Amino acid sequence: MTRLVPTLMVVSGYVLSFWLLSQVLKTLEVGIVYAIWCGVGMAIVAVVGVVWFGEGLGWMKLCGLLLIMAGTVLLSLAGSGH
């Protein structure tokens, strides 16, 4: 938070993210939206770790990501629209 441009980019990103989240919540159930929000966030962080920080992508990490995706799909299928 000591450099202005990166700080403004992060704050702008958070504001945009929460605004977009509020728009999606107008049409979808909160459980589904939260599952997608968390799942996508975790997947992106895992990919950033592998690509930029050289972390390993072992079978346990890959299985964890697949389970997150499967849980999100199951929550979506269990929603009131199905």
Image: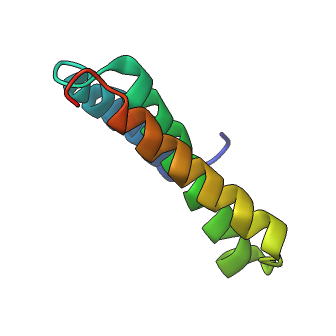
Residue 8, percent from left and from top: 45, 42
Would residue 4 be visible to someone looking at this image? Answer: no
Q: Residue at x 53, y 51 (%)?
A: 70
Q: Quadrant of the C terminus?
A: top left
Q: Residue at x 63, y 68 (%)?
A: 48
Q: Residue at x 72, y 57 (%)?
A: 64
Residue 31, percent from left and from top: 43, 22
Residue 74, percent from left and from top: 45, 40
Vertically, is 33 above or below 39? above
Most foreground residue, 67 or 13? 67
Q: Is residue 50 left or right of residue 58?
A: left
Q: Is residue 49 left or right of residue 18?
A: right
Q: Residue at x 58, y 58 (%)?
A: 43
Vertically, is 18 above or below 61? above
Would residue 63 be visible to someone looking at this image? Answer: yes
Asked which quadrant contains residue 1, the reply is top right
